[in-house]
Amino acid sequence: MEKKKIILPSKKFFGSSDEDLNIRLGLDESRNLLREGDRTIILDNSVLFAKERNESPNYKIHGKLKMVFRNMYSGETTYDTLRERLYLVGDGTAAPVGYNGSFFVGFLPYDEFAFLRRDVFREVNLITGGTSSLNSYTPNIQLTGTNPHQSISSIEAPYHNWNIYLSYVYSGDTQFPMKYTLSGNTVYSFMSGDGIPFRVTDNGSTYTLTCPVEHGMVAGEYITVSGGTLNNSVPVSGRTFLITSVGDSFYRSEKFVLEINKSEMTSGTTLSTVVFGKRCINKTNITGTTSTYYVHKHKTLTEEKDYILDKVGFESPIWEYERKLLLENSAGTNDYLVERNRMESLIYDFKNSFVLTGLTNNLGYLPTEVYVTVVLINANGYFDYPPKVGYKFNFHDSWADAHFNGTSSIETTIPTTGFSRTIGATTFNFTGGTELPLNTILTGAFIEYNEYELKERVVSEAFHKFSNPTNIFDYYQEDSDYYSGASPTNKTGLYYQPHYRVKLRQLSPYVESSRTNDVYGLPQNAKYSEDERLWKWHDLYDHGFIDPDGFGTNFPFMNYTHYVKNDINFYLRNERLYTNKNDGIKKFDKFDC
């Protein structure tokens, strides 16, 4: 028997508040009389406000940006300009213990990582002695803070190391090349469309599959596996198995571990050490319910100077501020102040409102979100440039992943510029970046999309990785004895997340459906399912509506503009010294994943 339910008069999306059908009497009306000629028009202020709010495409994006970083690589340089500014391990008068007699081993100055540099030059008026008259005055203007490597003004300081852009996802790439490396440098190459990697453990009657990222599957669903052989000859590709259970005895392991039965496999089937899996909801409709996997492709919407960056007033970060006076630096300057760490709390504000119109995202409709994209610019050229792109499963506790080996993972769309400096008989070459033109294409998150649910899931955010040329700053980033797998083409370095989502509109989490396309106001995100013979879509919530699960948007609205505040914790991580699996899956290192 078909189940039916009477729904009270409400707005067009599920779960919204019922509309008030009562006739109000009294003096508390929110209506005004607007006389125009001989006509009287009744305006309901609340209705007019809601109408303007939901029709406005203008969004002013701003927020707080916190740098979270610990400068932990100590090394040496032969470039004198940089060596004079190192935060030395010792005090500059003797070699620190364990550093093979070198006096000038230290950490890069924090200004090389800062969003807001302090080593800027400016004009100052130095007071001089002598006589003067009421009718004449000769100022003594001199430059201070000049640097023989690069002279940076206070206006350029917020744009010298990093740039901030708005971007949106316009496409998805199923052919993005990836690698997954086990300890011992066993390398597995695959494309983003192949799915996510799993390490296989043979339990006799079952296989345990352990994923280095959250697999997004639950018991009772299915996994389509590629990787293995039948009778040691025929490759196993696209076989679908029931997930009998998820998780093991470790905390949160249900997000990373699943189990399948060998009884479902044809006799003689053997899975490889590493396989690639895709989520499948219904085995009787594999084509329509199996997820696809791809990498987001972003386009930039703003230019370099389209935002303002400044310090947050009346706020002190909780992290340690590390600086000291050296008795003597490498240039022989006494009492030289150096800085290793200075945690920053900043505000960013895009100067102009973003107009949400005329764009189409990778799923074919007007985007409901944009991204604040932070890109290393490296104008000083102290780092290898451009950065390389990787994902969570490319960072390990004790070895360098082969995904970053060579040049295949470099973000080639980022423009570069070169320059040189000569000290004595030695010339040092540097490669830095320039501003990104509008519509620059950048690589984004690794995504699972299930057409049956009309839903994207982030498998892993994208990360940019960068290091230093050894002739500029050498901290053993190429030494495999120091970090397994490191080499001149696969250096140990630093990494950060470049893209941060900003929700502008909210799609309902519920899938609506209709057997006819005569639905009033069928939204842009509607798709027709051939298997189910249904139109399916997610309703677009009105601004100001928050459903019982907390989904919705409620931005301040004024002057026909939504003011969207989006705070960012910007984590700049040390690859060698940062422990990647310290949140409940640390024990998974027994699987070498």
Image (tube, rainbow, N blue to C red):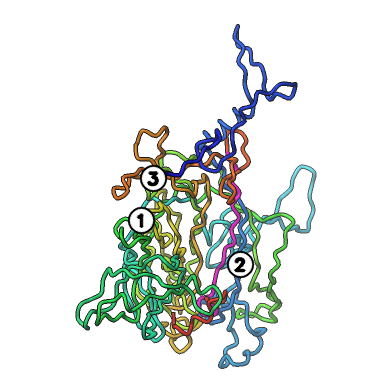
Front-most of residues 121 and 29: 29
- Of helix, strand and loop, which one carries label 1? strand
Q: Which residues are magenta?
A: 562-579
Q: Determine crowd level at label 2: few under 14, some 14-19, many 20+ residues with C-alpha closer than 10 A.
A: some
Indicate yes or no whether the magenta region holds residue 563. Answer: yes
Residue depicted at x 37% and y 86%? 204
- Of helix, strand and loop, which one carries label 2? strand
Q: Position of residue 72 (x, y in %)?
A: 58, 78
Q: Determine crowd level at label 3: few under 14, some 14-19, many 20+ residues with C-alpha closer than 10 A.
A: many
Residue at image mark 1: 172
Q: Position of residue 323 (x, y in %)?
A: 69, 74
Which quarter shows the C terminus? bottom left
Residue at image mark 3: 536
Q: Nearer the viewer, mark 3 or mark 1?
A: 3
Callout 2 amino acid: Val
Checking the image for residue 68, the label placed there is 2
Residues at marks 1 and 2, CA–CA distance in whole angstroms: 30 Å
